[in-house]
Image (cartoon, rainbow, N blue to C red):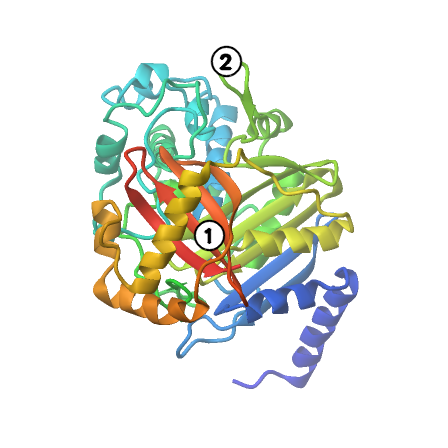
Amino acid sequence: MRLPALLVLLCLASLAAQDRLAPVGMVDACEAQFRQGGVGLSVAVVKGGRTVFRRGFGTTAVTDGAPVDEHTRFAIGAITKEFTAACAFLLAEDGKLAPSDAVANWYPELTRAADVTLLDLMQHVSGYADYSPLDYVDARMREPIEPDELLRRHAGRDLDFEPGTRWSYSSTNYILLGRIIEKVSGQPFGEFLRARILEPLGMSDTLYEPSGDEDRMARGHVTFALGPPEPGKPEGRGWLGAAGAIWSSADDLAKWLAALMGGRVVSPASLAAMTAARTLADGRFFEYGCGLSLGVIGERRSWGHDGGVEGFRSSSLMIPAQGIAVVVLANIDADASDLSRKLLDLATASAAPPPLRFDVPGPAVIDVIGACFRAMQRGSFVGIPVTEDFGAYLTAERLAGASLRLKPFGTLGKVEVLRYGERGGMEVTIARLAFQDAVLEASLFRRLDGRIAQFFVTKD
């Protein structure tokens, strides 16, 4: 369908006005990120409560894809948790629950339900094990599941730690929180979300647990060991829920972040609670609020969250004191947070602070990373202890392709640890791999018994 000439001119004028308001360098930053191997990318930047830059790059799919724009729908993954926490606080403002309420009020059969509060769930200090700690979808998650069955399996077993004594990211917390919201409100989570947040904010692009037949939907893509993008196989229905089942656009998420910062979603008291760091039982505190990671950028407080589901990555980042926010959505499993930070730095015109560093692991971890990389070059993990799931993931076809692509890099030189931490009870190490003429990045997930649960190689 041809657009009337006047409408075309108005659209072009709108884009030109946005580019004048947007800080210099944003388009260049997005294009540079996209050239590293993107399929589709959609971004938006908010300043002073209004969207000053929004743009799409690439296509919705590698083959037969439509151009991406600011209204293209992407799976936003864990950014969903921002919405879920806000829904819980809206019910608290209605007087129907309190963050201090025990899980036992609704799920007495779950482990230590009388000792775990809704605030513990929202701040990831419950001790409930994460049902999905890895960066690929294993066989069990291909099949649909009822949320209560998921909770029975993962919140009905022994806790990973005493409630309130540790912080450990766990999507199980938000599946449970979403079910409690449904029980308290008497509505399916998606209906409550739409009535209390999406419709009031005019977020018409945003969907919860879509069927996949809706229009303007991007398709997810995955890569393995520097391989080409290939279509992802999404999680079965029920696995994401209130922890990660929202699809949205950059334009809609810009509205959401502007409203959240502007106090138009929850009350000032609720927003203060959502953005307060958690103090643990021993007096330590962790910079995570309720569905929001907390930090400091350029000496100003920041809020945000990254998301990742099969074939998609997302990032939201805010400087509330300045009314600045950034959204990055991508339909490939490549990190989106680097670009969101670059765009935020451009928007705030502030120098980036030094990256957060964890304690550097000992030589044993470096040796394991080297051994795993050489195994990929050989196309065989024989002699290296791996988990059953990762062993099944490492098919002969995958390993053959990885060997073909990684052998040309030659002998591995220096292994430099970039970050070291914990996820799902596992040791997680991110390292830079140096070769004579190239640099790669590797992520190693290792269980406490020494078995490798994940080893991925990406471009640095």
Amino acid tagged 2: Asp
* Foreground disc of the pair 2, 1: 2
* Relative depth, front residue between 301 and 117: 301
Residue 193 in the image: state x and y as whole percent.
45, 42
Q: Is residue 450 above or below residue 394?
A: above
**Residue drawn at the location 33% of the way across and 28% of the way down:** 128
Type of amino acid at the residue the image marks with label 1:
Ile
The answer to whether residue 360 is above or below residue 352 is: above
Tell me the SS state at disc 1: loop
Query: Residue 335, percent across and down?
Result: 51, 55
Q: Residues at badges 2 and 1 in contact (C-beta under 8 Å)?
A: no
Circle 1 residue? 76
Which residue is tagged 2?
A: 282
Residue 327 position, x and y percent, is 59, 53
Residue 215 appears in which quarter of the rendering?
bottom left
Residue 57, compared with residue 174, is above or below; it is below
Gap between marks 2 and 1 measured at Cα: 34 Å
**Horizontal and vertical percent position of residue 103:** 34, 21
